[in-house]
Image (cartoon, grey):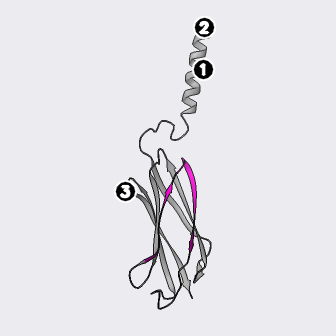
Amino acid sequence: MRRNILIISLIVVLIAACAVPGCLNTGPGTAQITNVTTDKDLYHSKENMTITVLASAQGDMSNTTLRITGIKNKYNEFQLDDEIPVNLSPGRNIVPYQHKMPTCSSCSGLSAGTYQIDVALVQNGIIISNTTHSVELRQ
């Protein structure tokens, strides 16, 4: 009788433990960028910008990269172009990134204006989630 109660108790504990999302997920994971913000909306030449990426993940998110590109000048060159390896944990993730803004001048090919920042999560070379955010750049 005691043995049966012990076995039933262990089964109940295992079922309760696996009620947590992702417990039984042994395959590839999924992730989604839920928000991208910057510490300000308006930047001037050479100012530091903090980009914060919020992402939600489930399952195995190994071999994941955060690709951030944007602020394209008149020569069609990105002034922001970086790839950051990230280890996303199941649930909510916050990934901060620092970037020094380029010089806003005719020589650099950047006029004052609104510029787009593209943010993508890439796993095994495939974009699994992406979004954009705009910032204003002035001299």
Q: Is residue 100 left or right of residue 117?
A: right
| Residue range of the region highlighted in magenta in the rendering | 78-100
Q: Tell me, yes or no, whether the two marked residues, 2 and 3, touch with CB atoms within 8 Å.
A: no
Q: Which amino acid, by three-letter code, is at mark 2?
A: Met
Residue at image point 57% right, 31% down: 16
Q: Which label belongs to residue 126? A: 3
Q: Which mark sits nearer the N-terminus, 2 or 3? A: 2
Q: Tell me, yes or no, whether the two marked residues, 3 and 1, touch with CB atoms within 8 Å.
A: no
Q: For mark 3, does the 10 Å Cα neighbourhood hold few (<14), some (14 to 19), or many (20 or more) residues?
A: few
Where is residue 19, by image quadrant? top right
Residue at image point 52% right, 51% down: 88
Residue at image point 54% right, 77% down: 135
Eyeballing the image, is 48 above or below 128?
below
Mark 1 element type: helix
Q: Which residue is mark 1?
A: 9
How much space separates mark 3 and mark 1, taking CA atoms?
A: 44 Å
Q: Nearer the viewer, residue 135 or 17?
A: 135
Residue reaching furthest to the bottom:
106
- Check the picture and name the quadrant holding the C terminus: bottom right
Mark 2 element type: loop
How much space separates mark 2 and mark 3, taking CA atoms?
A: 55 Å
Q: Which mark sits nearer the N-terminus, 2 or 1? A: 2
How much space separates mark 2 and mark 1, taking CA atoms?
A: 12 Å
Q: Nearer the viewer, mark 3 or mark 1?
A: 3
Q: Which amino acid, by three-letter code, is at mark 1?
A: Ser
Q: Position of residue 127 (x, y in %)?
A: 39, 59
Q: Which residue is mark 2?
A: 1
Q: Nearer the viewer, residue 64 or 115?
A: 64
Residue at image point 60% right, 8% down: 1
Q: Which amino acid, by three-letter code, is at mark 3?
A: Ile
